[in-house]
Amino acid sequence: MSDNITPQDEKYLRRALELAREGVALTSPNPCVGAVVTDVAGKVVGEGTHTYEGKKHAEVIALEKAGGNAQGGTLYLNLEPCCTTGRTAPCTDVVIKSGVKRVVAAMEDPNPAVCGKGFETLREAGIEVAITESALRDEARKLNEAFAEYIQSRRPFVTLKTAMTLDGKIAPPPQEEGGFSASDHGPSGGWITSDDARAHVQQLRHASDAIMVGVNTVLADDPLLTDRTGLPRRRPLLRIIIDSRLRLPVDSRIVKTAKDDVIVFCAMADERRRQELEMRGIRVEQLPLYHFEEVNIVGARPIKSASGRPDMWKLVKRLGQMQITSLLIEGGALINWAALAAGIVDKVFLYYAPKILAGTGAVPFASGEGFLRMEEAAKVRSLTFHRFAEDFAVEGYLHDPYAPHEPLAPESRGPQLVERD
Ligand SMILES: NC(=O)c1ccc[n+]([C@@H]2O[C@H](COP(=O)([O-])OP(=O)(O)OC[C@H]3O[C@@H](n4cnc5c(N)ncnc54)[C@H](OP(=O)(O)O)[C@@H]3O)[C@@H](O)[C@H]2O)c1
């Protein structure tokens, strides 16, 4: 950390962060990185944004643009430069050759192979390194939190998003079975939250590699689960349905719009149902079940509700193998509980509308057994409050993706909420 950061440094760091944000949905599984180069007089002579397809790292793009003007200048970055060889040579070599005399950054790279070593390499080459301690550091860390989780554990950073009434209901009482009760104007019973709040959910979808719902949500709401921001993305948002017995209707909107972007995770695949879905371009994968005696425990208590259904830890492990770095869970109540009980949720984004549904029939935020004692309750930390027209949202963390942790080993970690911070 350094305190020798000037207001001008903060200005260019902010610009680097802005450039990094232009890479959202274009860099995964790599981090979002932006770079600014100034010359000896402090004038901007190069800028760059990393995209996965563009391959070149942001600092290399910015330094190439700056050319000889970088000599004696400063390089601003939201993330520590790499010192390892991956798809490209180490960026530290390029920085050293460029002749800049100073590097100002917002944070260390959470990649255990880099983490401080990039800065050390620059210092050894005689380059001054300054790392901000301002709010920009927190912004930079938030921007790359999914990368931080993925690069350490090789599983996606999981955000649980739900829209609910003030009394914690996510839908009115379920309708009679058979046929969809939703319409193009919203899910069964209409939208809970305002246009502004739902536009923000689209931003969350845009920043995610994958989205997941339980099969009952498809049966009730017939959602599309698409990224409708209109912004470019490198890979389509992977739409995931968790559906033990393949009940997903072939006339659902998600099946009708599938373009190599829908995957169904089941527990037992009926061959005829599997073929019906696969013929329509849906990928069907069978996941191992929860093993009741071995791992299906919260605290000291068995969770009966999850047995016979796909194992959530196996699911995130599988998604990690597919280079999915971020997963947005959009419910419903049983899936919310299954994810919380398994301990896969890293962050919650809970949207509240100033409405009260009341009644025992309305669908609660999370059903299933729930945590039976206060000390077992999932602890949500580092809260941020957001306002959207008449609605508000609470964003908070169950796990710190930056805390050093072991690569994913569900068998050894068990499904309990794992304290990582
Ligand atoms: N307001 C919101 O933000 C929001 C968002 C989404 C949904 N909703 C509402 O939520 C309601 C649906 O919620 P829901 O609780 O009935 O269903 P759900 O959570 O959408 O789906 C639950 C189903 O998923 C399957 N499943 C597969 N693997 C599972 C696992 N490991 N653990 C648990 N279930 C697993 C189970 O069916 P199988 O046993 O057949 O596999 C289970 O019945 C709808 O009314 C919808 O409108 C609201």
Image (cartoon, rainbow, N blue to C red):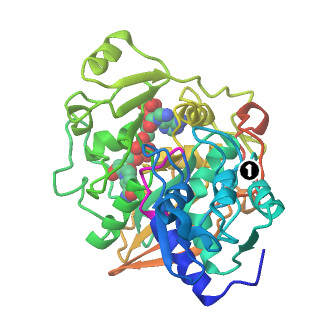
Q: Mark 1 points at which residue?
A: 114
Q: Is mark 1 on a helix, strand or loop?
A: loop
Query: Of residues 385 and 119, which is closer to you in this image?
Result: 119
Viewer-nearest residue: 236 or 353: 236
Which residue is found at the position 55% from the left and 65% from the top?
68
Q: Does the magenta stretch include residue 34?
A: no
| Quadrant in the rendering for residue 144 | bottom right
Tell me residue 72's x, y (percent).
65, 73
Q: In this view, does 174 lie to the left or right of 323?
A: left
Foreground residue among 316 and 209:
209
The kind of residue tagged 1 is Val
Give residue 86's position: percent from left, percent from top. 63, 38
The answer to whether 158 is drawn above or below residue 154 in the figure is: below
Which of the 4 quarters of the picture holds residue 145?
A: bottom right
Coordinates of residue 386 in the picture (x, y in percent): 46, 77
What residue do we see at 23% from left, 27% from top? 250
Range drawn in magenta = 20-29
Residue 365 visible in rendering: no
